[in-house]
Image (cartoon, rainbow, N blue to C red):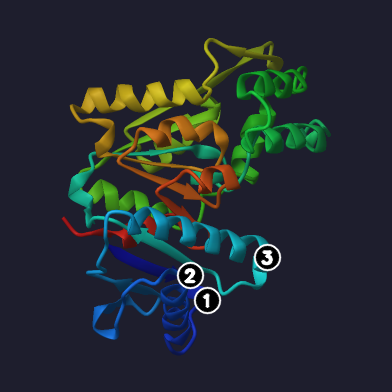
Amino acid sequence: MELILQRLATNATSDTASLEERCKLITSLTNLNINKSQLTYVTPNVLRCTDIPEDSDSFATTKDLLRAFNDLVVNKEGKNAEQIDVTLIKDTLRLSDFGLLAMDMDSTLITIECIDEIADMHGLKPQVAAITEAAMRGELDFAESLTKRVALLAGLPATALQQVYDERLQLSLGANELIAAVQAAGIKTLLVSGGFTFFTERVASRLNLTFNHANQLEIIDGKLTGKVIGTIVDADEKRRTVERACTALGITPQQAIVMGDGANDLAMMGIAGLSVAFRAKPIVRASADVALNYVGLDGVLNLLTAP
């Protein structure tokens, strides 16, 4: 087994004490057998603990303990936490093990929920955002919630979409670095979203992504009608999209890295070789192989060794 601790470079102190102290705390809580000779600093902000012995039950038990520990830090300490992400890996993973990186868009690859920002142009952000949050927590059926939210946008000028893209859409921390690294390694990319094609197409073009798939808003006479054209991209459609991309590439879903933040991402994350919850809802953190709560999207690269 391997244990990887990482923090944002902006949070770095003049020494590495906090990473080692967190490692010691984890060792005492989980009974992992770690000594100093097993510690390697990949960078001053990334500490890797290798060759950790395991028995048949220790990985699952230790992973559950670490998940509870991480959730405690996130929920109780919040912004006052040391902001260290801790990941336990059972087997060494290499970039060359994967052929596809699939990503959710809203609140994963980008920092906003596009539908909430569109609604803000209509003075309806609180109403729409409340439905979005409930859907992402898994409390509402996604297709039903999307239909309700889109209906509230009826009559809004379509120019609001470009305004949101130009003024509010920003890539998440580490997005450029992650995309550049996987593309350099020959890994194909998929942007699959319960959001809208207006944004996925532009983001995919901007980052030179291989595939993209999302919902299409109906626009008539320059205004949103409050309807979506065609099949809604819900959790099952996201999973099918990942499967289709893998088939097109001649690989299995086990050769895909899938990243997301909301309940709508769980189905596609469930078939992946590596699932990554990025600043995600608790239900997603609990199910993913990896939860990154503080570092950027490129933090996944620190979990993988070079090809």
Residue position marked by numbered label 1 in the rendering = 11
The local crowd at label 2, few if under 14, some if 14 to 19, many if 20 or more residues have their Cα within 10 Å, is: some
Helix, strand or loop at label 2? It is loop
Q: Give the amino acid type for the residue marked by disc 3 in the picture.
A: Lys
Q: Residue 81, position in %: x, y?
A: 61, 72
Q: Is 176 situated left or right of 247 in this image?
A: right
Q: Of residues 3 and 101, which is closer to you in this image?
A: 3
Q: Residue 120, position in %: x, y?
A: 77, 37
Q: Number of numbered discs present?
A: 3
Q: In this view, does 231 lie above or below 296?
A: above
Whether pointer 1 and pointer 2 mark residues with C-beta atoms closer than 8 Å, the reply is yes
Q: Which residue is drawn at 29% across and 82% down?
A: 35
Q: Give the amino acid type for the residue marked by disc 1 in the picture.
A: Asn
Q: Of residues 298 and 275, which is closer to you in this image?
A: 275
The local crowd at label 1, few if under 14, some if 14 to 19, many if 20 or more residues have their Cα within 10 Å, is: few
Q: Give the amino acid type for the residue marked by disc 2 in the picture.
A: Leu
Disc number lying in front (3 or 1): 3
Let me know if residue 281 appears in the view.
no
Q: Which residue is drawn at 66% across and 32% down?
A: 135
Q: Of residues 62 and 217, which is closer to you in this image?
A: 62
- The quadrant holding residue 227 is top right
Q: Is 89 situated left or right of 135 in this image?
A: left
Residue position marked by numbered label 2 in the rendering = 8
Q: Which residue is drawn at 37% across and 80% down?
A: 44
Question: Cα distance, mark 1 to mark 2?
Answer: 5 Å
Disc number lying in front (2 or 3): 3
Let me know if residue 60 appears in the view.
yes
Helix, strand or loop at label 1? It is helix
**Could you tell me which quadrant the N terminus lies in?**
bottom left
Q: Residue 76: which disc? A: 3
